Image: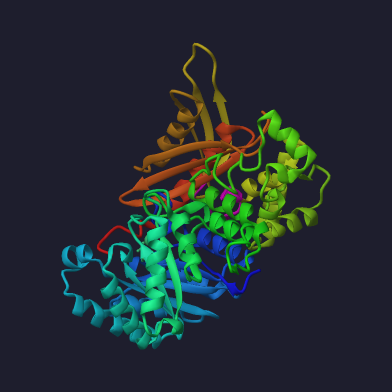
Amino acid sequence: MSNDKLVIFDTTLRDGEQSPGASMTRDEKLRIAKALERMRVDVIEAGFPIASQGDFESVQAVAQAIQDSTVCGLARALDKDIKRAGEALRGAKSARIHTFIATSPIHMQKKLRMQPDQVVEQAVKSVKLARGFTDNVEFSPEDAGRSELDFLCRIIEAVIDAGASTINIPDTVGYNIPHQFGELIRQLIERIPNSDKAVFSVHCHNDLGLAVGNSLAAVLNGARQVECTINGLGERAGNASLEEVVMAVRTRQDIFSCDTTLDATQIVPCSRLVSGITGFPVQPNKAIVGANAFAHESGIHQDGVLKSRETYEIMRAQDVGWATNRIVLGKHSGRNAFKTRLQELNFEFNSEHELNAAFSRFKDLADKKHEVYDEDLQALVADSNWAIENERFQLVSLHVCSETGETPNATLVLCVDGKEVKATSDGSGPVDAAFRAIESVVHSDTRLQLYSVNNITSGTDAQGEVTVRLEKSGLIVNGQGADTDIVIASTHAYINALNKLLHSEAREHPQHGDV
Ligand code: KIV
Ligand code: ZN
């Protein structure tokens, strides 16, 4: 039985976005934030406001839109960072500032070039400054996993006295081993005289594949907040994956004396949303959210599950949001059913125009595909080409020729700033030809960083979901497209990326520059 609440702090929009290539636009961050709120995540770390104007605006937009979760902004222990975070969070119903400074000998000596006394002084000053903006202040001693215990005790006691109510212990470089990390948390809580005045939190990276293991060991030793990301996205090898932490604690209530208040049925839709937006596919054997997580291949297993599900399943697929390939809609479904199902899947339309355009695409899809699954609907709305009025580039028509022994060729009509332009090109394949034809008109001078195609459901009539990642002068965007024809899906994805890049939605990766 659970006694305590385990706070879930999601950092998909901040640490998750630090995965190279996973940059998100403000609108994409908003969509993910709303999905996290619907899942009842307690704290959403929306970004690092000082990092760029784009990140500032994203945090601001999330702070204003979210009602039921606390919205958090990250800030180094520097006055300018904290003031910027405070400004971005103004107007939030519940705001938290998360400030950090490194405490390991290597970081203090080599990176900060500061003495330990100076680090403590800076941390205390920053927490006090942050308290001027909100009562809800979190402090992280960065690289705590390689810091000295006595120094950690000293700085943490001081920042709690200064007003920090959450103390987050990051294993920044993913160096720790579960029993050791659990012991670190236990010692900190035991030795710091005012530890009862704060919630202890952990933030583990996955460099040794131990982020979830370390987080759970910490929870067993008194941590009551876990920082995590959807699909384990994050810097380098990623962060602890939210879905694994939440389901481990919930499934093993015989061991944990705490539980989260998350709506776990939102896990799979949220995982899909993040994967679609970032272009980071989920590996099939990924726990909880991988396509095979609840699939039974061996005859013995299948036989066992048919006789009694518990023989080989420790969780129910539907409890984490798997819709068991339910056919939700077909060609006779109406606009209202379409809108309602998408609301259930976390998607809200911003205007009647968006709804109408999406519904018309749904009708086209239902004509081609007959059986439309939740996954198809999610891809249909993730492919935002149809949603944006007045985009610079729009695909009017596409004709491709692909024949054995012949060079593939594409001819397309693009609408550029309201004017139709025809273009044609050869290529090594039909997709290459279509991209070259677009470039013969647009001359974008971008670099293709990623091109990926995933089938959304099974069967040869399935939609292909395409992600195209383009880079130009340090700016990175992910474009999405979905269609039963993968050349059309690819063309949509390419045009979507170009529109984002030229729509000033793109911004420098948050890690670039000196931040
Ligand atoms: O990994 C880390 O140390 C961080 C901190 C900012 C908490 O992301
Ligand atoms: Zn981190």
Residue pictured at 38% horizontal, 58% vertical: 507
Residue pictured at 42% horizontal, 72% vertical: 73
Residue pictured at 42% horizontal, 70% vertical: 186
Residues in magenta, as a range: 382-393
Residue pictured at 48% horizontal, 55% vertical: 212
Q: Nearer the viewer, residue 95 or 447?
A: 95
Query: Is 418 placed left or right of 250 in the picture?
Result: left
Quarter of the figure with the N terminus: bottom right
**Residue 259 inside the magenta-drawn segment:** no
Question: Is residue 339 visible in the rendered structure shown here?
Answer: yes
Query: Is 353 placed left or right of 59 in the picture?
Result: right
Quarter of the rendered image showing ligand 1: bottom left
Query: Is 277 placed left or right of 340 in the picture?
Result: left
Residue 140 screen position, x and y as percent: 36, 72
Q: How is the image coloured?
A: rainbow
Query: Is 381 placed left or right of 498 in the picture?
Result: right
Quarter of the figure with the C terminus: bottom left
